[in-house]
Amino acid sequence: MGDATRIAEEQDNRSSGVVMQIELTQAEHGLLVTLLQERQRELLREIARADHHDFRHTLQEREGMLEALLHKLNAGTVTSSAA
């Protein structure tokens, strides 16, 4: 399979809403939440400083995805295993 075909399939998977499941230990879950929260704070600062409307909009979309991911992690909808 060529690189172009593989990239096209990966893009199709992302756009078709392929669901992934991951098992995390409590420590891994905590680390992931912490890293995502830190990145979310950075994004909010970037959004506040962004001058270009399209760039700001892109950052806001990313921040929204991070917020949704954090909500899933905090709601326990991602499978986690005991440490």
Image: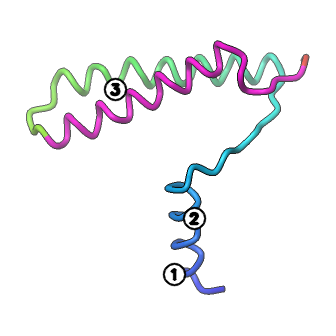
| Quadrant assignment for the N terminus | bottom right
Whole-percent x and y of residue 12? 53, 64
Q: Residue at x 50, y 25 (%)?
A: 68
Write the residue at 50% across / 17% down: 37
Q: Earlier along the polypeptide chain: callout 2 or callout 3?
A: 2
Of residues 76 and 31, which is closer to you in this image?
A: 76
Say the numbered circle drawn on residue 43: 3
**Can you name the residue that lies furthest to the right here?**
82
Callout 1, which amino acid?
A: Ala
**Residue 46, quarter of the rendered image:** top left
Residue at the (80%, 26%) spot, across then down: 79
Say which residue label 1 marks.
4
Give SS at disc 2: helix
User: Which of the two discs, 1 and 3, labels the residue nearer the N terminus?
Assistant: 1
| Residue 79 numbered tag | none
Query: Separation of disc 2 and disc 3 at Cα?
Result: 26 Å
Q: Which residues, given as a range, are shown in magenta?
A: 54-81
- Give the SS element for disc 3: helix
Q: Which residue is mark 2?
A: 10
Looking at the image, how many numbered discs can be counted on the residues? 3
Q: Residues within 10 Å of mark 3 (few under 14, many from 20)?
A: some
